[in-house]
Amino acid sequence: MSMFQFKQFAVDQSGCAMKINTDGVLLAALLQGDNPQRILDIGTGTGVIALMLAQRFNEATVDAVEIDESAAATAKRNFKASKFAERLNSYHTGFEDYLAQHSARQYDLVVSNPPFYIHSLKSPEAQRELAKHTDKHFFDNLLNSTSKCLTDGGSLWLVLPMNTAELVQEMAVKYKLSIHTQVSIASYPNSDPHRQIIALSKFQYPIKISNFIIYDSPKKYTDQYSITLKDFFTIF
């Protein structure tokens, strides 16, 4: 089904190689911000993260960047159809070009559910390959660019595979960014974490470390999951 209905908006997924996924919605629901005024969503895809953040932070303007033409058009349609349309902007461009063209803009929050699979085989389908394959060069550029556009109190929030999260934390030191939040996500109580949400900022803060479990058992969500997404998913 191409249309995904949330409580306060709907997301049309047609034209997007990467559909709505747990990684993105958890990133948008779990990240923290102190009344952010301007948010940048890098690689917005369908626009779901931008829409969730527009719902959560009702004074924020959200700029969403997407390099894939079809996905950018989909996000633009989803933004226009939402009640948050006046605070959502879609840009069909790469994030480096976008930030070069808007170098004066400063962001309280920068978020991304980026492509991963560093050093893995590329996907056979062209759009999927663009969305999911990357390397260290991508994260070097991401960290370098965002370190310049963050406000002094701003944060970069990412959701990543565990090994990639570790690599990005090491790389962040080069750009004088320090981790302050780390959420390890596992499918079940006894399973190993497979994703990690990390937050980086210009200043060093005590690191908040936590764990997040999605399922108690197959098809039974944890209270932690349902409480986190109750404002968004119609099933809760």
Image: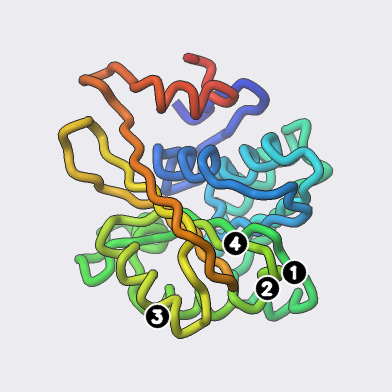
Quadrant for residue 66, please give it. Answer: bottom right
> Reading the chain from its start, which is encountered first: label 2 or label 3?
3
Residues at discs 2 and 1 in contact (Cβ within 8 Å): yes
> Reading the chain from its start, which is encountered first: label 1 or label 4?
1
Q: Tag 2: Cα neighbours inside 10 Å, few (<14), some, or many (≥20)? A: many
> Reading the chain from its start, which is encountered first: label 2 or label 1?
1
On residue 155, which mark appears? Answer: 4
Residue holding disc 1? 106
Give the residue displayed 25% in from the left and 47% down from the top. 194
Marks 2 and 4, how far apart in space? 10 Å
Give the residue displayed 67% in from the left and 36% down from the top. 56
Q: Nearer the viewer, mark 3 or mark 4?
A: 4
Q: Nearer the viewer, residue 77 or 102?
A: 102
- Amino acid carrying mark 4 in the image: Ser
| Whether residue 60 is visible | yes
Residue holding disc 3? 137
Residues at discs 3 and 1 in contact (Cβ within 8 Å): no
- Amino acid carrying mark 1 in the image: Gln
Q: Nearer the viewer, mark 2 or mark 4?
A: 4
- Badge 4 element: strand
On residue 149, which mark appears? Answer: 2
Q: Nearer the viewer, residue 15 or 157?
A: 157
Q: Tag 3: Cα neighbours inside 10 Å, few (<14), some, or many (≥20)? A: few
Marks 3 and 1, how far apart in space? 23 Å
- Badge 2 element: helix
Up the image or down, 131 lies above or below 54; here it is below
> Reading the chain from its start, which is encountered first: label 3 or label 1?
1
Q: Tag 1: Cα neighbours inside 10 Å, few (<14), some, or many (≥20)? A: many
